[in-house]
């Protein structure tokens, strides 16, 4: 299993966040669902709009194929590229260990 961390380090305002959320729902997610090997994605967002996206996949190649699928999409009508500056950095790691937390501690 592999994990990809995609960082959006800069604070983003409501207009940028709305544009990013629209892009994810309308363009990015549809492009990624057809890529085999993806397991799960978590979006971690701070109140200032900075964000880390954690994507888990069965292989490094699945993550690379997903990146390619996203990068080959065309902007939809009405999407403003100025509001979608892209990620600051992307890192891929092999998953070393997984810990399951099945119950709450007393």
Image (cartoon, rainbow, N blue to C red):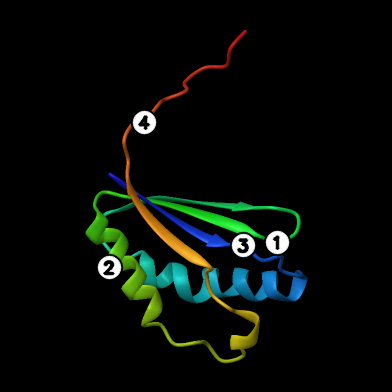
Which element carries disc 1, helix, strand or loop? loop
Q: Which residue is mark 4?
A: 98
Residues marked 2 and 1 touching at CB (< 8 Å): no
Q: Which residue is mark 2?
A: 65
Which element carries disc 4, helix, strand or loop? loop
Q: Which residue is mark 1?
A: 49
Location of the N terminus by quadrant is: top left
Q: Residues within 10 Å of mark 2 (few under 14, many from 20)?
A: some
Sequence-earlier tag: 4 or 2: 2
Q: Which residue is mark 3?
A: 9
Q: Is residue 8 above or below residue 75?
A: above
Distance in Å between CA atoms under marks 2 and 3:
24 Å
Sequence-earlier tag: 2 or 1: 1
Task: Between label 2 and label 3, give the one nearer the viewer.
Answer: 3
Which element carries disc 3, helix, strand or loop? loop
Q: Residue at x 44, y 62 (%)?
A: 90
Percent x, y of residue 39: 35, 49
């Amino acid at each position: 299993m592999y994990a990809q961390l995609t960082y959006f380090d800069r604070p983003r305002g409501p207009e940028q966040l709305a544009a990013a959320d629209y892009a994810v729902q309308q363009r990015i997610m549809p492009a990624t669902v057809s890529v085999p090997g993806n397991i799960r994605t978590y979006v971690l967002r701070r109140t200032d709009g900075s964000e880390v996206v954690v994507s888990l996949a069965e292989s490094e190649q699945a993550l690379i194929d997903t990146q390619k699928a996203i990068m080959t999409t065309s902007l939809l009508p009405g999407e403003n590229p100025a509001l979608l500056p892209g990620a600051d950095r992307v890192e891929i790691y092999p998953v070393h260990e997984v810990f399951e937390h099945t119950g709450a501690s007393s």
